Structure formats: structure tokens, C-alpha cells
Image (spheres, rainbow, N blue to C red):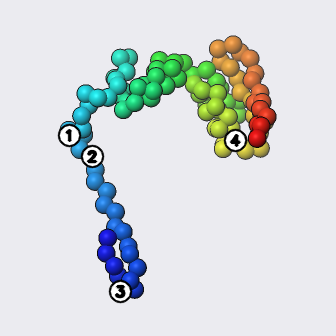
Amino acid sequence: AHRDSQGVMQTTWQFVAVNPEIEDISTRHRCMTCGKSYKRRTHLRRHNQYECGVPRRFRCPYCSQDFRQRSCIWTHIRKLHKRSTLYCLDIGTGKTLYYEKRPTYA
């Protein structure tokens, strides 16, 4: 940090790239199926539960894009199909699922 001519303190930030050869990979949690690794065990659990080897179960009725998680399809429809009804197709059961807004309590 240094002072300029006005007497105001300014801070300068420096970004340093992490060298992958130096990073300790022995502390990472590795997926036994695909080999991806994560710093936290909870991230590996999420990967195993929702991503790795899990079929895409929910289909957008407007563009036929498939998703593994229901929350992802609701976000997709809100962003890309803004004035459309929030519903999707469950590929596994063949049912139509509608978005239900749950009440929030203060």
C-alpha cells in the first residue's frame, strides 16, 4: 500500500497463479469412477450423487434439453423461457412435474 499526493491510502492486489505441479494432490478426494478430484469430501459426495454416472432425468418441454437435477431445470426455464409455465418431464417415470412454490415463514 502507498499514499498518493492527496493523502488517501490505496491498496494494490497481486494475483498469483497456482502451479498445478506444486499443488499437493494427495489431499484431494478422487472419484473412483471418472477420476475427477475435489478439495472437499462433500463436493465428491455431491458429484457421486448427482453427476457421475447418473442419467439425466428431467427434460425441458420447450427445447428438449435434459438435466440431472430438478432445481437446474427450474433455473433453466426461468432464464431461457421466461414467460413459460414452469413444468418439466420426468424421463424416468414419464410424468409431467409442475413447479410448486413453497410458503416461506419469517
**Marks 4, 1: nearer the viewer:** 1
Disc 4 to disc 1, how far (Cα)?
Answer: 42 Å
N-terminal label among 3 and 2: 3
The residue carrying mark 3 is: 5
Q: Secondary structure at mark 3?
A: loop
Contact, mark 4 vs mark 1 (Cβ under 8 Å): no
Q: Secondary structure at mark 4?
A: helix
Contact, mark 1 vs mark 2 (Cβ under 8 Å): yes
Residue under the image location 29 percent in, 29 percent down: 27
Residue under the image location 68 percent in, 38 percent down: 77
The residue carrying mark 2 is: 18
Q: Residues within 10 Å of mark 3 (few under 14, many from 20)?
A: few
Q: Is residue 10 visible?
A: yes
Q: Amino acid at mark 4?
A: Arg
Q: Amino acid at mark 1?
A: Ile
Residue 6 versus residue 32 in the image, above or below: below
Label disc, if present, on residue 22 of the rendered structure: 1
N-terminal label among 4 and 1: 1
Q: Amino acid at mark 3?
A: Ser
Residue under the image location 64 percent in, 31 percent down: 71
- To which quarter of the image does residue 99 belong? top right
N-terminal label among 3 and 4: 3
N-terminal label among 1 and 3: 3
Q: Secondary structure at mark 1?
A: loop
Q: Secondary structure at mark 2?
A: loop
Label disc, if present, on residue 78 of the rendered structure: 4
